[in-house]
Amino acid sequence: MPRQGLHQTKAGPEKNPRREPTAAGQRDAAVNRIASHNYFLLEKFEAGIALTGTEVKSVRAGRVNLKDAYGIIKDGELWLLNCHIGVYEHGNIYNHAPLRTRKLLLHKQEIRKLIGKTQQKGLTLIPTRVYFKQSRVKVELALAKGKQLWDKRESERRKTTEREAREAIARSRRR
């Protein structure tokens, strides 16, 4: 009869219980950085987005582009247009179209509020970021008003002076 002893194995590298940072919600899947340069972002809303399976996998991989995307309200429903979600590379014949129109999910009272505000002259809906929240894909929409060229120059001047002030303070602390 073989001798039964205590069998001990070496502990390998501990597995990270967290998922990929984008999928775990620690990092945004996409950010529309040019939106704050081209628009005054007045108010922000969080909306769900109706996606297919391959689209969700592409979002997890970070293959989302919000550069020319915008939101529109049609027949009491909110839609996202021109949002490019890249084709899933391991997909098959049922892969999604990259530029298809996607439905955004908001409560009725929020949609009614947006209808009233977007009918004002010059206001539009711009997606500012796409992220995961409790394994669901969310889109942050901003109610925005377009900037004129002189507004953009003023914003740039303000950013430059603030950056220079921060650098001067940091230099004085180092001495």
Image (cartoon, rainbow, N blue to C red):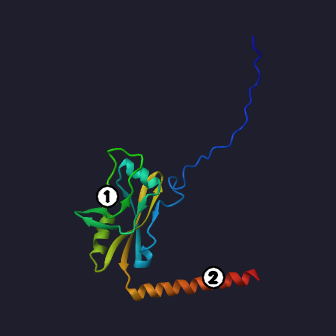
Q: Is residue 18 left or right of residue 40?
A: right
The picture places residue 112, in percent across and down from the top left corner, at 29, 67
| Towards the viewer: 90 or 64 | 90
Identify the residue at the far top of this view. Answer: 1
Q: Is residue 18 above or below residue 35?
A: above
Q: Decide: few, some or many residues near mark 1? Use Cα within 10 Å; few <14, some 14-19, many ≥20.
A: some
Q: Alpha carbon of mark 1 to alpha carbon of mark 2: how far?
A: 42 Å
Q: Quickly name the residue at label 1.
A: 102
Q: Position of residue 71 (x, y in %)?
A: 32, 67
Kindly indicate the quadrant of the structure image that contains residue 83. bottom left
- Residue 6, horizontal then vertical, whole percent: 76, 25
Disc 2: CA contacts within 10 A as few (<14), some (14-19) or many (>=20): few
Q: Is residue 6 above or below residue 43?
A: above
Residue 102 located left or right of residue 151: left
* Residue 68 quadrant: bottom left
Q: Amino acid at mark 1?
A: Arg
Q: Residue at x 62, y 85 (%)?
A: 165
132 and 159: which is toward the camera: 159
Point out which mark residue 24 bears. none
Please name the residue shown 33% across and 51% down the image.
96
Residue 106's quadrant in the figure? bottom left
Give the structural element (helix, strand or loop) at label 1.
strand
The quarter of the image holding the C terminus is bottom right
Q: What is the quadrant of the N terminus in the image?
A: top right
| Circle 2: residue type | Arg
Mark nearer the N terminus (1 vs 2):
1
Q: Is residue 155 left or right of residue 5?
A: left
Check whether the beta carbons of the residues at disc 1 and disc 2 lie within 8 A of each other.
Answer: no
Helix, strand or loop at mark 2: helix
Residue tagged by mark 2? 166
Q: Position of residue 34 (x, y in %)?
A: 43, 74
Q: Residue at x 73, y 35 (%)?
A: 10
